[in-house]
Structures are given as structure tokens and as C-alpha cells.
Image (tube, helix red, strand yellow):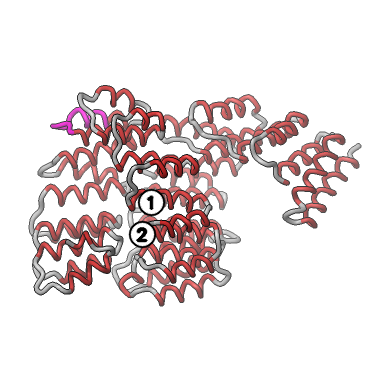
Amino acid sequence: MFGKCGSVEDARKLFDQIDNPDTVQWNIIVTAYAQNGHFQNAKSMFDSSPQRDMVSWNTMCQSFSWSHKVDEVSQCLQKMPQHNVVSWNSLLCTFAQNGHYPKAQALFVAMPEKDVISWNIVISQYAEIDLDRAKLLFDRAPQHSVVTWNVLIAHHCEESKRVFDAMPCRDIVSWNSLLDVDQDQEIFSKMPSHDAISWITVIAANAREGHLDCAMDLFDRSPSRSLALWNVILSGFASSGDVNRARSILSSMPRTDVISWNSLLAGLLEFSSLRDAGELFAAMPHRNLSSWTLLVGGYAQHCETPRQAAAILLESMPQDERVDLVTWNAMIAGFARSGHSIEALELYRELEKLDRELQPDASTFAAVIDACASAVPPAVSEGRAIHRQAIARGMDDDPVVGSSLVAMYTRIGGLDAAQRCFDRITARNTVAWNSMLVGFANHGSATGVIQSFHAMQLDGAIADAVTFVAVLSSCSHAGWIVEAGQCFQSMAADFFIAATPEHYSAIGDLLARLGQIGEARSLIRAKPYESSAADWMSLLSACRIHCNVEHGASAAAQAFEFGELDDPIAAASGTCKLLLGIFSAL
């Protein structure tokens, strides 16, 4: 009934018109709020319902699960008069999605009953950290539905084709799972039929990889365009920085929801101006907690007076959303990213003083630890105190918190402390490994970087572009030309990572350091990206070291030309100093 309404506000108006709504209708309105991100409203309606059945309690558990509130899900289960497998699955899913793997494993073993969803959750969890264990669990599952096969396919990228070929029967979801893994239009073209998920998957894959023209072509060819499909193409353009095209798409949509508007709002905050974002926010017909969180975080990060702006926004927020931890985390993270570390720490202290059930979570600790690390000078004592608080709350082994701790200690010179924090992380993901690699790189330990890089692969973490920047930069500073060449080739051949300007700069810097000035100059000119003033200044610096006047003069001219666009005085000063250094060495 409420599902036919255009928004959750319309659903609430319809609900309020019902005399003595029954339990089913209460459950529906709670679900409507939860599914649209209004978790405080969902909780309020749940608390107001005169009667609650098993569905009521399970709906509330799922609401907490969707908002990643682990403790609340546990407390909800404790208060429930009785449980069923849906109840246990909510807690199991929450543990798995938030990285609490030991708790998820223990719960799965202890669950009094399990269904195929329980098995799918735990198989998906193990597929992220232990492929062999995931396969073992798959073999032990009492039944193999098509959904179970799809879970295995979607999480076993290297062996997905083999598993797919072994399936005794396939449905369209199976094809969609394989399509999502490979992001390959060839698979899409071979599918015997396509449903809405097929089109969404292939268009989202192209948009995610930046192939927006291809994504738009597929969108135009799609036989039907659901709201979800419109949101995918809108989000693709907004997140890539083409906010004008995103605006055009939004205005063309036959129907919008809060996800549509939030996608454009996020794009404007990232790539346009606060004024544009504020005007859009004022015109938004749909808002939820995520809308306010985006705006508050944007003002905290980009506004000249972020503390005052964020305070005004907080006062403007609806009362039931103002106390949400996500909003506080967005402000703290926004202050930290924009260099306002003192404001981030002050806000964290205010959060600690709040006389309500609003306790810091992993995102809070990660954001405020980042603020301590980015402060000038680093807020060492505050960072260590917050580290102790994270330990007291049992969050120092969380991958997000642990990665921030590693980054903080490497920044303040505590490589041993960083290593201890890294060793404490229970499920090391790519971000955690990158934090350790970057730490070794910043301390000039090329050996530590290479050893960690190999250990990372043995641990099952997937290297990304940031990983290879750290590895190539370390090879450059160590003068390891052979290792750098092998790494650069492996990046594309083995990891399917396209080289970025940072990767090319690391190789160019290495060649220049070794005196191969001509090769470094050729690389700068031949790379598929426009060269920068930093590229030519690096080459000019090498020319000074190796007393290469011919290439030095050319590099100086290029450095001045590119640098003049940003800061002509600084460009001229730095270029002249290096050029004079070359001449004085003759």
C-alpha cells in the first residue's frame, strides 16, 4: 500500500489518515523509513507502535543493520521476546559487513537454526578473507540454490568462469554475477536474455570505470528505464565531475527520489561550489539524513569558516537527525581533510560530552586520528590518548581505525608503533596494507616496502594504484631500476591497473636520478598524460646533479612554462636557482 507512494513523506501522510492502524501497517511504515535512510524516524515509529510481533522486531533489527549499528542490533536481539532465523541473520550480516569476522564466525556456529541466507552471508564473508574456507563452507552447505551459486561466483574473481561453467543450471542472476565480476560487455552480449539487473550492472560497471560514453550508449539502448537505472547513470556523471551533464540527466528524469538528489549534491560539493550545492539543497524535494550529512561534511571541508557554517547547518537540521553519529563523523572528517585539525578535535571532545546514547564508532576514531596526524605540528599527545580510547572500546583492531593509526604513527616517526598497530588489525584490507607501505616509503625503507608488498599478496589483499605509487617511489629513491621496471610491467599485466601520472613520474624520477637524462626526458614527452611543472623541475634537478647543461636548459624552459600558470614568481625563482646550480658546477 505505502509502496505506491512517491516518497516516504507521502507514505507517512497516508499512514496518519488510517484510524487504528494494525501491526502490519505499523511494520510497513517502519520499513519505509528504514529503507529510505530515516533510521531515527524508523526507531521512533517502532517505539510508538502499540503492538509488536516477530516481523516488527526483525524489521527494527534490519534497520539497525542497514545503518551499520552493531551494538543496536545486538541490543535489539536481547530485548526480543523470541527469535527466528531472520533475527539471527540480521546480526550475522551486521557483523560480517562491519568487519567483525570472529564474532560472525562464532555466531554462525552457535545459531540454533540456519537457512540458505545464513550460509550465503558467511560464505560471502569468507570469500573476502579466505577463499579456501569459503569453498569448504560452500561444499558443506546443506543445499545449493541458485542464489548460493551466485554468491560464490560474485566473490571468486579468479575462478568465477570455472565455477560458472560447473553450475548444473543457470538463471539470469548467475549471468549478472559473472558480468559484475568481469565488467565485460562481451559477457553481456552473450547472455541469453537481459533483465533490469543486467542493464544496471553493465551500465554501473562502465560508469565506475569512467567509460561514461559507453555507459550512456547502453543507457540509451536499454528497453526500459527504472528509477534505479536513471540513478546509476546520474551518479556516474556526478561522481566523475561532469556535474552539468548530471544536472541535465536529473531534469530529464520522469521521477526522482532522495538518491537522485543526493548523487547530484555529492557531485556539486566535490567538483563545483558550496553556493551551487546550497542552492540545490534548498530546492531538493526529498531529503534524508544522508542529504544533511553530505552538506554538513561539505561545508566542514570547503567553507572558509567551517566551524560556524557547520554549526548553523546543525541548528537547521531536524531534531531527530541532528543527533545521528553519521553527521558528526562527516563534520570531523571534513575538518580533518580540509586542514582544520583543531576544529576536528574540538568537535570530537564535544561529542564525548553529549549526554545521550551517541558513542564514537570506528569511523569517528579514524576521522579524529587522521586529524591528529594532519595537524601542524602533529597532535602527538592527543593522538596517543585517542589511541588508548580506541583500545578501551575494542576498536583498535578494526581495519579502518588500524589504518589511521598506522598512518598517524608513521607520520610522527614511530615506525615500530605503526607496525604494532598494523599487526593488531584482524582483517587487513588493501587500505591497511597501503598505510604500512606508504609509512615505509616515507621513512625511506625501500626494503620494507618491497617485503610488505610481497606479504600483502600472500595475505590475499589486492594491490591498487596507491600500492604501486608507494612501491615505484621507493624503487626510485633506492635506485632500483630493474625492480621498478618489473613492477611497472606487472601493474598492468598482472593487476590490470592503468598507469597514472604518479606512476610515470616515479619512473621518470628514477631514470633522472640514475643519470639517464635523455630517457627521462623522452618518458615525460611520451607518457599519455600532459606533463607538469613538477615533472620538469624533477628533471632539472637531476640535470644539476649530473651537470647536464643541454637538457637542463630545455627542462628549465618547460618548467617555467608550466609553472607560470600556477605561480609565476615561485616558478621563476625555483627554475633559476636550479639552472644557476648547473652553470656554477661547470
Which residue does the image show at 66% across and 38% down from the upper left?
505
| Residue 136 colored in magenta in the image | yes
User: Looking at the picture, how far across and down is residue 408, in whole percent?
Assistant: 51, 52
| Residue 43 colored in magenta in the image | no
Q: Residues within 10 Å of mark 2 (few under 14, many from 20)?
A: some
Element under disc 1: helix
**Count of residue discs:** 2
Which residue does the image show at 28% across and 45% down from the upper left?
96
Which residue does the image show at 56% across and 52% down from the upper left?
412
Q: Which residue is mark 1?
A: 230
User: Looking at the picture, how far across and down is residue 159, in whole percent?
Assistant: 34, 26
User: Looking at the picture, how far across and down is residue 300, in whole percent?
Assistant: 50, 66
- Depth check: give the residue in front, 323 or 220: 220
- Depth check: give the residue in front, 204 or 362: 204
Q: Is residue 557 left or right of residue 279?
A: right
Element under disc 2: loop
Name the amino acid, label 1.
Trp
Q: Is residue 54 left or right of residue 44?
A: left
Quadrant housing residue 469: top right
Q: Which residue is mark 2?
A: 256
Quadrant location of the N terminus in the rendered image: bottom left
User: Looking at the picture, how far across and down is residue 554, in whole percent?
Assistant: 83, 39
Quadrant location of the C terminus in the rendered image: top right
| First along the sequence among labels 1 and 2 | 1
Residue 196 appears in the picture as rendered: yes
Part of the protein shown in magenta: 134-145
Which residue does the image show at 31% across and 23% down from the upper left?
162
Residue 387 appears in the picture as rendered: no
Q: Are marks 1 and 2 in contact (CB under 8 Å)?
A: yes
Name the amino acid, label 2.
Thr
